[in-house]
Image (cartoon, rainbow, N blue to C red):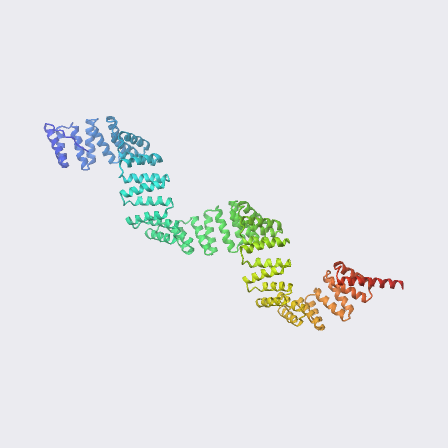
Amino acid sequence: MSLKRTYLQDEANTHYNLGIAYYTKGQYELAISEWIQSLIKNPQNSEARFKLGVAYYQLNRIDEALKEWEIAVSLDPKNFEVLHNLGIAYYNKGDDAKAIENWEQCLEIRAHDAEIHFKLGIAHYNLGKEDRAIALWEKASNLNPEDSDVFFRLGVAYYNKGLDDKAVIAFSKAIELNPKNSEAHNNLAIVYYRLEMFPQAIDEWKKALALNPRQPEIYNNLGNAFSKLNQHREAIEIWQKILEITPANAEVYFKLGSAYAKLDDLDRAIECWQQCISINPNDIEAHFNLGVAHYNTGNFKKAITYWNTVREKRSEDADICEKIGNAYCGMEDFAEAAKFWNRAISYVPDDPQLHHKLGIAYSKLNKTQEAVFQWQKAVEIDPNHFEAHHNLGIAFYNLQRFDEGLREWEKARDLNPTDADIFFKLGHVYRQKRRLDDAIVSWKKAIELDPNNPNTHFVLGNAFDEKGLLDDAILSWRRVIDLAPNDVDAHNNLGIAYFQKNLFDKAIAEWEDAIRITPENGELYNKLGIAYIKMDLFEKSVECWEKALKYKPEDSDILSNLATAYHNREMYDKAIEIWKRVIKYNPQDAEARNKLGIAYYNKGMYDQAIELWKKAIELNPKDAAAYYNIGTEEFEKGRINEAITAYRRVLEIDPKFTQVYYNLAIIYARKRLFRDAIDAARRFLQTTPTGVEAENLKTLVEQCEQEMEQSAEV
């Protein structure tokens, strides 16, 4: 506020002039005293009242100043300075309406006064009349285009109304007029930030900091901008500067933790968030993030601790209950996981993912029906929930409810037709339903989607094998070996396939590869022995079976193969020794007793042989081979009727045991039962029309027919 010097001649003027002198020297009380004396002499002196109000104002005696100025303006209604000062005083008292009233009168006197337009804009803005304020400031900017404060105020108003482009222009003009206006740089940066023009925002905030380095809020905003650009290291560097100004700043430590987490530096993230809660123990988001960080590092117990702290503040927060359940699941404590997922569902019952997770927990707890119920609930809420359909398929498959399993996996396939695993599983359920062709189609599709999965090639090979497509099976299993050279099952299956094709050398190569991978596998040595015997490599066969018995000393199949090999080499003593071992380990093995009997028979120990065959029949009354051997022994001993009885018993047990017909034909012919002999011979010839035995019986039939003709003539 300013005073004009006016020297009047009378006594009133003397006091008036003294007041001016004292005011000029800063002696406001003396100035007031003189101006009061002047007004006593001349109460109508509006200029004296104006100056008295100014002196009161300087001493912060606002109400007295207002009183004098109101009188002054009543004396001189067109006094611009009085009206101006009244506006200022009312404004500073927070009475924007009265300030506007006086400044509007100023405009009536000076319509083009830029300052009054500016101040009126501020008062209107304070009253929430943003559009009026903007209009006044725009007028002020036209009247005085060099006033940076006007453009600054316009920038703020434009920003608050969402007119960001205009705000940029206004703040830029304010900076052009006053490049050292740190706040204008800051505000321009804020506008750029909202426009997602982050590099420009960074540039302006850097300029603001260059003008005033100790501005924590600007460092905070600058760090945010770097973070938006995924320049997290730069953000960290900026936010750390805030700690130099305000070391105990929990918010900064929180942001630093978040930045380190985005850089996958979880140890430092945890360190920062722990520092955050040491400053502000009630920062729930920091506790939450600490839980997430510990969960992601596999420290589920600590994650639960932090999340339980969050749950104390958010008692009905489904998300936090879900996360605690996830952590218990990570610890394989599925009962606790189920408890928390159930709690989450009580808050948000229509969340399909929660029902899906609860189903997994129940499945792990072997509560299959409960798991199925939850997965069915998940697909009821969200029919397109792929994982729930997938898991329902698994559950139904394991329950051998194949139709339901098929239905769920087909839905999953329709939802995600590029998921190779679904086609893999569909193949299995098709196979269980004896739809082998569909299984093959599914597994081929799985291979098309994921050509490098050895498991799919393996089961496809098995399917080809079941259909008798051995060459296709071999191709599939060979692909398994290409992808997984140490797959023992694939080598084993290839060995079996080559064996069936009489490619014994290739079978041997596959089984030897399998043994190299699992050298203590007795079953593989057994198969290798069988292949060697097919190639007439007796010693190698025996060597393999001996190795097999090292790992499976009581395996009757291996012992039987070894005994049979010795028997076929007429090494009956060795064969007898091995068959006895079979019987020792398997006393109820009728077949072993039968074959041991054959060995004794071949050594001429007939009584022992018969006893063994009888024991075999006792153990297995339907042992056709034992009856056959007894019949043969009785026949050779001349006990024809006993032999016939034994042979007939063979045919009762196994009508396809056609070798019996050969023996019966000979016996009946010797007994001169020619018709029976011819009938038996013809039954044999139906299945074995060629060979030495067939030729013998054809001759026998002719002889029997001749005998019958001769008997008829007599």
Q: Is residue 554 visible?
A: no
Rendered image quadrant of residue 209: top left
Say whether residue 58 is visible: yes
Circle count = 0
User: Quarter of the image holding residue 703?
Assistant: bottom right
Locate residue 702 relative to residue 188 in the image: left or right. right
The x and y percentages for residue 336 are 46, 55
**Whole-percent x and y of residue 640?**
78, 68
Q: Residue at x 75, y 69 (%)?
A: 634
- Measured along the vertical axis of the image, is residue 222 above or below residue 169? below
Q: Position of residue 54 (x, y in %)?
A: 18, 33
Q: Residue at (64%, 63%) from the top-left corner?
A: 535
Instruction: Please state which of residues 98 and 180 is positioned toward the viewer in this rendering.
Output: 180
Q: Quadrant of the N terminus?
A: top left
**Residue depicted at x 62% and y 60%:** 504
The C terminus: image quadrant: bottom right
Residue at 28 percent of width and 43 percent of height: 210
Left or right for 645, reference 584 = right
Closer to the camera, 14 or 603?
Answer: 603
The single residue placed furthest to the right in the displayed view is: 714
Q: Nearer the viewer, residue 237 or 451?
A: 451
Q: Position of residue 144 (x, y in %)?
A: 26, 31
| 360 versus 96 height, above or below | below
Q: Quadrant of residue 198?
A: top left
